Image (cartoon, coloured by chain):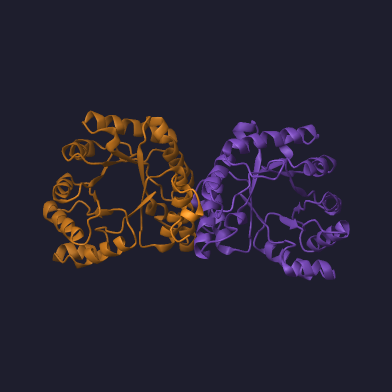
Chain colours: A orange, B purple
Amino acid sequence: MKLIGDNLRITKPDIQEALKSGDPMPVQGLVKLCVEKGTFAIDVNTGPLGKSPEKGMAFFIKAVESVTHLPLLIDTSNPVAMKAGLKGASNRPIINGFSLEPRKLEKILPLAKEFDCDIVGFLLYPDSRVPKDEAERFEVAIELIEKAEDAGVPKERVIIDPIVPPLAWEDGIVQARAVLNVIRTLPDLLGFDVRTIGGVSNLTTGAGNKKKKNLMVQSYVAMLATAGLDYALLDILNAETVAAARASSILSKENIFSWGMVPGG
Amino acid sequence: MKLIGDNLRITKPDIQEALKSGDPMPVQGLVKLCVEKGTFAIDVNTGPLGKSPEKGMAFFIKAVESVTHLPLLIDTSNPVAMKAGLKGASNRPIINGFSLEPRKLEKILPLAKEFDCDIVGFLLYPDSRVPKDEAERFEVAIELIEKAEDAGVPKERVIIDPIVPPLAWEDGIVQARAVLNVIRTLPDLLGFDVRTIGGVSNLTTGAGNKKKKNLMVQSYVAMLATAGLDYALLDILNAETVAAARASSILSKENIFSWGMVPGG
């Protein structure tokens, strides 16, 4: 399980301010920290970028790439911003992402073909609803893969995001368990070694005691690792969550056989 | 997943001393602490109890039962001590346990029939070797259940212990993964809802950095809970491990559907 920091987000006031003022320092400082903590890639969550999506995306790409050459996930729902990101990035980035929403199928998915890059596929209904159980998630996954292939995107390019639910939802824990089963079963169901990605931070959105929330995240990342999740999108600066995720990866990674092989173990 | 403290052990100097001097206080104090921390049962690990097994076992049972009415696991390899424990305990105790070792089959297993009680069955070869992979563990499990039924013990009375390996073993991590798969698959394989128990403390026996060991245990208990382990035998006084185990249980327990149902959540 590879860990990807979701820390760079436009919703943070200092990042918003950086974009407005054109000062790359806050972005650079944050990305440097994420790199130090061993993030596998940088999720560049710019939001739709309003009236100047191309200029805004160029600012972010330049700021991030001035401090790291790690791969980028371009995380925006605006196709114009997305295209600018795909054009601007030096390494081949990952599109984050598309779903069965008509606008995403029409405007985002074709970019994966145009730029020959990986694309995250969210298990969501066309109206953005989250499927209610495993069966519905499987149906959506099959349809997503079909849509990708129809658009000329090889199925191996799609990284499925089964949508980790907030535990605060009425049936949050049931949904969280369904997500684990989906991750475990999807490669068999789809008949190829499909990769999966999960947004761990989503789990503790909303109410709840902080200590208990942290414990839940730590347990859940262990379960995600066992289920075979390929990429965990999370707060890479949360030392406890990251330590739990790394320990879980070691315990579930096929190519580590013993404690003696664990670095520093 | 129910948590059972393995804290009461004859190998601890103060417990040894308590037995020698006949002073129940150290035993009572320790058991009280375990009860406070919410242990589901008390594992009474007396060892073979040398020359006066009956007297020794009576001391422990009396000391423990003077502070709690929780169920006891009688944890000794000495059949005479075991029988004394089974006779002495007020609630129906659990025998911990038997294996394919001839002495255990002859002397311990029949006590489960005689006292009509649950018995832990260790997945070990007759010469006490640990099976080397999942297939071997399954073979041993099938044989254990057969032996139990041959001895007139209903198979539902057997609680399988797949032997959590020390990570310090040459192939410790591979074995730890095999144990998870065995726990997950055993009910299907045996064709009934067999219960399982795992000795979590065993995982970090031997060398290793302490912080990393704790992380491994926390991740592994989450994996055990997901795999469907019924009873985790562990240091119930280790707050971090216990918190991780409880969070994992909540995330994997069939009858908890949402965060709102988590006590204090």
Is the residue A140 above or below the residue B16 in the image? Answer: above
Residue A74 at x, y = what percent?
A: 23, 49
Rendered position, B178 above or below B70: above
| Along the viewing direction, whichever of A131 and A179 lies nearer the viewer | A179
Q: In this view, does A139 lie to the left or right of B133?
A: left
Q: Residue A130's image quarter?
A: top left
Q: Which residue is drawn at 81% across and 51% down?
A: B78
Q: Which of B191 and B144 is in front in this view?
A: B144
- Name the residue at 14% across, 49% down: A84
Label count reads 0
Q: Can residue B60 be seen in this view?
A: yes
Q: Residue at x 69, y 41 (%)?
A: B125
Residue A37 x, y percent position in the rendering: 34, 62
Q: Position of residue A8 (x, y in %)?
A: 27, 58
Position in image of residue B130 (x %, y %): 64, 45
In the depicted view, which residue is nearer to us: B64 or B11?
Answer: B11
Can the viewer see residue B256 in this picture?
no
Question: In the rendered view, does A146 fall on the left or right side of B36?
Answer: left
Instruction: Establish if B2 lies above or below A29.
Output: above
Q: Report the front residue among A88 and A99.
A: A88
Rendered residue at 14%/64% (across/down): A22
